[in-house]
Amino acid sequence: MNVLVLNCGSSSIKYQLLDMGGEPVLKAKGIVERIGLPSGMICHKNDKDQAYDLETPVPNHTVGINLVLDALLSKEHGVISSLDEISAVGHRVAHGGEYFTKSVKLTEDAINKIESCVDLAPLHNPAHLLGIRAIQNILPKVPQTAVFDTSFHQSMPASSYMYALPYKMYETYKLRRYGFHGTSHKFVAQKACDILAWNFNEKKIITCHLGNGASITAIKNGESVDTSMGFTPVEGLMMGTRTGDLDLGALLFIMEKENLSVSQANSFINKQCGVNGVSEISSDMRDLQSESEKGNERAKLTLDMYAHRVKKYIGSYAAVMNGVDLIIMTGGIGENSCHIRDLVFRDMDYLGIDFDFNKNDGIRGKDEMLSKEASKVKVMSITTNEELVIAMDTVSLVFEKQLS
Ligand code: ADP
């Protein structure tokens, strides 16, 4: 049973084909880029690691999805022989607003609701809708699902999600904190509980998803009770190119001094700040680590700032939940950067954490315990896989009856 997982952006389509018949198997993955520009391209790789790149104009998402299907069907580098072998399509959808508390099978009503969240995610939701409509045209009989970045965080209490703005801003614009990366936070927390044979619904867990985008979530008794991203993904931790938490007055000051329009300011806080902006070296943690080892003081400052903010959120979420049983590090940085983990977990013994600094040094891209046996609070590195969550949710939504 093959599930096609799609993440449609405004100018790109990322895809994976997973066989979900038994243990999930990744059969192919790739990306279509530069949709709408004069020269587009597709980069495709199958399960035998055969790569296939093609430069060709991709005027719209329907053409892009047809390219994906052609690649999957190709005699040379394809993995299926007929489109009938695609049982369902699961879409990553950035914003479900207050409508969706979990993944859904796509109906016209669900599509209309995603459409009404366009205001909240003006870059992402329109692109997802183009992908959904393209699949409806090309594969009209194939069921589709939507898996939302926001839905896991819908359990947050109003005291977490409201901003201290006039209440009418919430009533008029639905302006509130939504949070993102929900699929990843939930997945790694559940996976860790499975490994530890713990009941997910009885634990206090802090999940740190540290990738290019980064967010941290407090999960109490199986529900998100607070998360660091807000109305947009800019809030919270320092990220590759996003500011994270910033005094709003500082932004107004910069806009005035540098004469920035709203859209320039938006691009500034999303693309020119964070790790890249402070270091003036790179947004990639690996570059900063190697520069820091060579004695570059700015790289060291950037790494220290990054870790300081993660530490600060961990402390505040332990306070929010009246304690914590488990802290999880995930995402490219959380799973791989021993250096950042080392900085974050220094001097955290007050919280009941006995971190194993020696073991931490060798752990990259693995599900592993990073705290010592006797540590009251456990710390783990857990690998995330958002596409797998989308495929799993799709199977359970579409084939519920057949599976049970
Ligand atoms: P995205 O948010 O784009 O999915 P990822 O989760 O892939 O991002 O994370 C990308 C980040 O992970 C980059 O900053 C990269 O430097 C970092 N990273 C990947 N591998 C390592 C490593 N071995 N050591 C330190 N950082 C790493």
Image: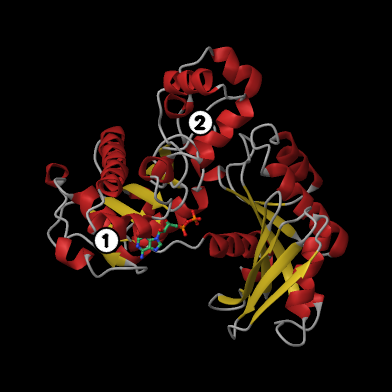
The quadrant holding residue 404 is bottom right
Distance between mark 1 and mark 2 Cα atoms: 31 Å
Is residue 214 left or right of 354 when viewed as pictured?
Answer: right
Q: Residues within 10 Å of mark 2 (few under 14, many from 20)?
A: many
What's under tag 2, amino acid-wise?
Arg
Within 8 Å of ligand 1, the CB of disc 2?
Answer: no
Within 8 Å of ligand 1, the CB of disc 1?
Answer: yes
At a point 55% along the width and 42% down the height, the residue shown is 150
Query: Which residue is disc 1 drawn over?
Result: 338
Q: Nearer the viewer, residue 286 or 222?
A: 286
Instruction: Name which of mark 1 and mark 2 comes first in the sequence.
Output: 2
- Where residue 177 is drawn, which disc sits there? 2
| Image quadrant containing the N terminus | bottom right
- Residue 187 pos. (x, y %): 46, 57
Q: Nearer the viewer, residue 352 or 381?
A: 381
- Where residue 171 is drawn, which disc sits there? none
Q: Say which element carries label 1.
A: helix
What's under tag 1, amino acid-wise?
Cys
